[in-house]
Amino acid sequence: MHSGPRGRHARAFLSALILALSSPGLSAYAVDGVAANAISTPSVPHIAASVADNALVDDLEHRTFRWFWDAGDPKTGLVPDRYPSPQTLSSVASIGFGLTAYGIGASRGYVTRTQAATRTLATLHYLLDGPQNDTADGAMGYQGFYYHFLNRGTGLRFSHDIELSSIDTALLMQGVLFVQSFYDRQTPREAEIRTLADQLYKRVNWQWMTRPDNRLSMGWSPEHGFIPSYWEGYSEGMMAYILGLGSPTHALAPVSWQAWLATNNQRWGDYYGQTFLNFAPLFGHQYTHAWIDFRGVQDAWAREKQIDYFENSRRAVYAQRAYAIANPGKWQDYSATMWGLTACDGPGDVTRQIDGQSRHFLSYSARGAGRDYTQDDGTVAPTAAAGSIAFAPEIVLPTLQNMKNRYGQNIYGQYGFVDAFNPSFRNGQTFWTDREYLGIDQGPILLMIENWRSGLVWNVMKRNPYIRAGLERAGFEGGWLPTPTAAAKVARPDTRTSQLAPQSPTAAPTGDATRGPVAPANPS
């Protein structure tokens, strides 16, 4: 049993928000019996991946890439929400992950650079040519934004209950900006990719989606106008603000970043041995980081807390693992190498008697564990662990090995790990496993594996002038960003409209034996 097509990102975030607001003791200093002084901040070790680890990661990355390549329509570039599946809707967010996947595939040699560029160019043309207007039935999007789900056959809004989505458009634009900077050669095809990507990004009217209180609305529809819910507090909404701040045409004001940060102090605190900015499902700690490297990069809030957002995500991963070890819900098989709560499919909205105890299970839901809320029905999502490999490989690799070795072909197939499984939801000798793969869960697996192995996606995005401008206007400094003084000397006002492609291909990233083989840079 799976969720319907309506606004999955918005629903997942809203359910998370409702649970967070209804959870008692949000500002308490001890949560679930874990005292405030039980804090152990993990370091960032350089681990030596074993031959078996490298073999698993190599196989998983290739299989996950094949999902995007096989699922995507080569003529339109539309990527389904889930595949294989009888559903007929395409996901705008999946397209964003897909555009990035093609560059990874070219770098790894899964496809040629020409094949990847051809698929990318078809996608950008289709998106740019799709109708943008305020009608209920005749549009792909409006004001540069796109509807959450599109009809696979027509490319238009899937149905009247599908919203024009700010976050799904942001996920799409991350992919658009990736291809703008990845395809850097002086060829007609790659020059056209850069031009089309620039047009798509500049068309998004972030100011139109902004409420009077400077926060971004979650979306809009012709029938109801703007959605009352808005992006506030640490979540995947982070990327929408950075993209909006970096726009040279419809830029958000820096005050929007401060509005988004307003609830940070309420979510900052101790949970299962870690002190961090909480967001219960791990996807909120992964999505923005899949494209942007926050190591050593801090805004004013992070500087005050003496942390960066990468380290924050790392602590969130460790806290989830500690939660699974404690296993307060007594779910089957939870351990130090069996964990992972995030938004994912589930067995269904049903109550069953398990070992003499009444247990309620969920279908698609924003599962998670944090100070904001806990929602756990024993369903494990491999993307929660695999999509966190760049944060904490030393605990993710053993978990992926255990999942695959323990459950084998029940959860690992043609396109890697299925979306979710639940060892507690049993029918005789078998347990519930998904039979589908979701683009928004496959994406973090692929991108973060590549970031861990070579830093490819992060390094490409560091070259993008719009990403850099968005971070700088949000007040980020340090790490790979230039100092404010240095940035000013490089004519900062011109960085968002300057020539995007260097005169020669970017050099290959330096290898790191602790992270597995490096992808070759921009292969033919």
Image (cartoon, grey):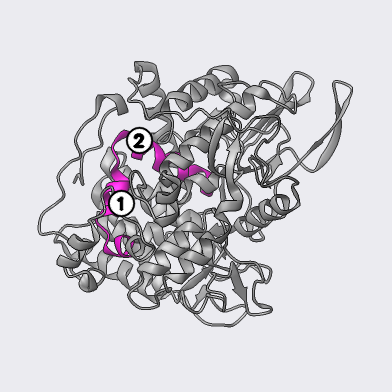
Question: What residue sits right under mark 2 in the picture?
Answer: 452
Query: What is the quadrant of residue 375 in the picture?
Result: top right
Three-letter code, disc 2: Trp
In screen coordinates, is 84 left or right of 305? right
Q: Is residue 309 above or below residue 239?
A: above
User: Which stretch is magenta?
Assistant: 440-469
Q: Is residue 446 magenta?
A: yes
- Would you call the spot at circle 2 few (<14 residues within 10 Å), some (14-19), or many (20 or more)? many
Mark 2 secondary-structure assignment: helix
Mark 1 secondary-structure assignment: helix
Question: Does the image show residue 417?
Answer: no
Distance from disc 1 to disc 2, alpha carbons, whole Å, reads: 22 Å
Question: What residue sits right under mark 1 in the picture?
Answer: 116
In the rendered image, residue 112, in percent from the top left (x then y), is placed at 26, 45
Residue sitting nearer the eye, 276 or 464: 276
Residue sitting nearer the eye, 150 or 217: 217
Q: Comparing marks 1 and 2, which lies closer to the viewer? A: 2
Residue at the location (39% across, 72% down)? 128
In the rendered image, residue 417, in percent from the top left (x then y), is placed at 53, 32
Sequence-first disc among 1 and 2: 1
In the rendered image, residue 335, in percent from the top left (x then y), is placed at 61, 21
Residue at the location (32% across, 47% down)? 457
Q: Is residue 57 above or below residue 288?
A: above
In screen coordinates, is 414 left or right of 20? left
